[in-house]
Image (tube, grey):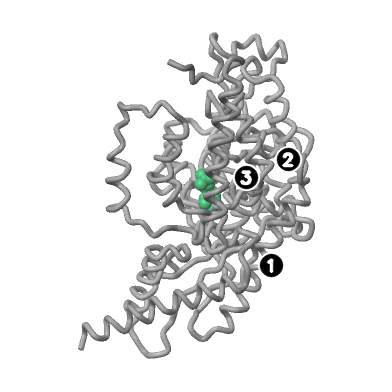
Amino acid sequence: MRSHLLNHLTAEDYRRSVTEGVARVAATLASVEQPFSGVGVDRLAPVVDAVDLDRPLGDTAAALDELSEVYLRDAVYFHHPRYLAHLNCPVVIPAVVGEAVLSAVNSSLDTWDQSAGGTLIERRLIDWTAGRIGLGPAADGVFTSGGTQSNLQALLLAREEAKVRPEDFSRLRVFASECSHFSVQKSAKLLGLGADAVVAVPVDREKRMQTVALAAALERCVAEGSVPMAVVATAGTTDFGSIDPLPGIAALCEQYAAWMHVDAAYGCGLLASPTRRSLLDGIERADSVTVDYHKSFFQPVSSSAVLVRDRATLRHATYHAEYLNPRRTVRERIPNQVDKSLQTTRRFDALKLWMTLRVMGADGVGELFDEVCELAAEGWRLLAADPRYDVVVEPRLSTLVFRYVPAHVTSPEDIDRANLHARKALFASGEAVVAGTEVGSRQYLKFTLLNPETTAADIAAVLDLIAGHAEQYLGESLERAS
Ligand SMILES: Cc1ncc(COP(=O)(O)O)c(C=O)c1O
């Protein structure tokens, strides 16, 4: 049987197979007319289930033909201008080249002896990012699998730095705005904190954490004999893109000796923005920062990092194993990234960002993010002027939260149902994909704009589609009621 292992003997086969795969994807991307086919689970699951995994096809071309049926034909395409749903970006080509290289070479970034230059590249990018944040000379960090893991690691360090004995973990409190990401709660649970460890701090009309409320909550915490372990400021909330007031939060963290973590999973794109960097002012005072390059740096999943002001704090993630990173490697100054990471075997995701910066430069990436922020501002003007819609806040970044409100009087529940229906019907048609969320226990719709190819005309067209579906639903429900 022909060898499928990639090595010096199979280089030609590798070139042919990968070229074949790339050709299929390129042809698919060029021909995709809408972001989604609209296929339902009921129709697609039997196609996937019918594949006999114990009978290999033995041939790349045949496997790619099959892949068209089970995946490519019905995938959700983020590069399409009418994919407006979640925090997923179309990816830049240099990063995709990086992805192809890293999986072929297959470096693992846990130790120097499995990666060599890969480790140095990752370290340069950590330093580059920390420099853009302004974390100072002792900063460090590590690439992670995503914002969830970055937040978890940051809070692990914060818990350890709080210097509280495990039997007192239930006294630890983490403050985060009511619009913060759910991974903060998940992290608290994983870290063994109490059920009420995460204190939800109210937000203002712009969906930014209220510092006055934070100050009051911190004071209460101390008065009750609890310990303010950390404040998580969000720089780019998932729904609204709102940025918490970082300087005010930093001052309170200093006052209460609480760890300041900035979750900039979404807003990190501002670090490269030629015009909007000032929105992150105050981030340089953080103890730790989450950045998701796979959100606003147009990188393929996964590409994320956690950065810290003081590299010594990363020791809380350090374990030495004789087989991998024995203690002596520290004395020998061997750079083993596993000493800083929650993971062991770890992808060389950094290569994608490296290729991106080397081909496009930071400004090139930042300008793409600027474009989507400008598009969101245009979308907001459209929505604010459209009597069919109620829009929540003027965007700071690139999301829009809004809902269809019919001209005729109907109940709030009907409006909720009409919006839910519109989102579902749109997804089933595949013509556009939008997200949804809840605001004040009412159902809203959400556009997350991360595709610079999307135009105001696309936004207007999708708003018409939504209105059409919502009206149709309300019309039919009136008929049902009569
Ligand atoms: C503000 C914020 N933090 C963290 C995360 C989690 O990131 P990931 O999905 O990469 O784990 C998200 C995801 O949307 C987010 O919006």
Kindly identify the residue that appears in the image at 59 percent across and 11 percent down: 326
> Which mark, residue 299?
3
Secondary-structure class at tag 3: loop
Give the percent coordinates (x, y) of residue 233.
60, 53
From the viewer's perspective, is residue 217 above or below residue 189? below
Closer-to-camera residue (100/444): 100
| Label 3: few (<14), some (14–19) or many (≥20) C-alpha neighbours in 10 Å | many
Q: Is residue 299 left or right of residue 71?
A: right
C-alpha distance separating marks 2 and 1: 26 Å
Give the percent coordinates (x, y) of residue 21.
53, 37
Q: Nearer the viewer, mark 3 or mark 2?
A: 3
Kindly identify the residue that appears in the image at 57 percent across and 19 percent down: 10
The N terminus - image quarter = top left
- Dots 3, 2 in contact, CB < 8 A: no
Residue 420 visible in the displayed image: yes
Give the percent coordinates (x, y) of residue 119.
68, 25
Secondary-structure class at tag 1: helix
Q: Residue beneath label 2, please?
A: 130
Tag 2 or tag 3, which sits nearer the N-term?
A: 2
| Label 1: few (<14), some (14–19) or many (≥20) C-alpha neighbours in 10 Å | some
From the viewer's perspective, is residue 317 above or below residue 301? above
Q: Is residue 318 left or right of residue 3?
A: right
From the viewer's perspective, is residue 26 above or below residue 277? above
Q: Residue beneath label 1, please?
A: 374
Amino acid under label 2? Ala
Q: Is mark 2 within 8 Å of ligand 1?
A: no
Tag 1 or tag 3, which sits nearer the N-term?
A: 3
Query: Quadrant location of residue 37?
Result: bottom left
Q: Nearer the viewer, mark 2 or mark 1?
A: 1
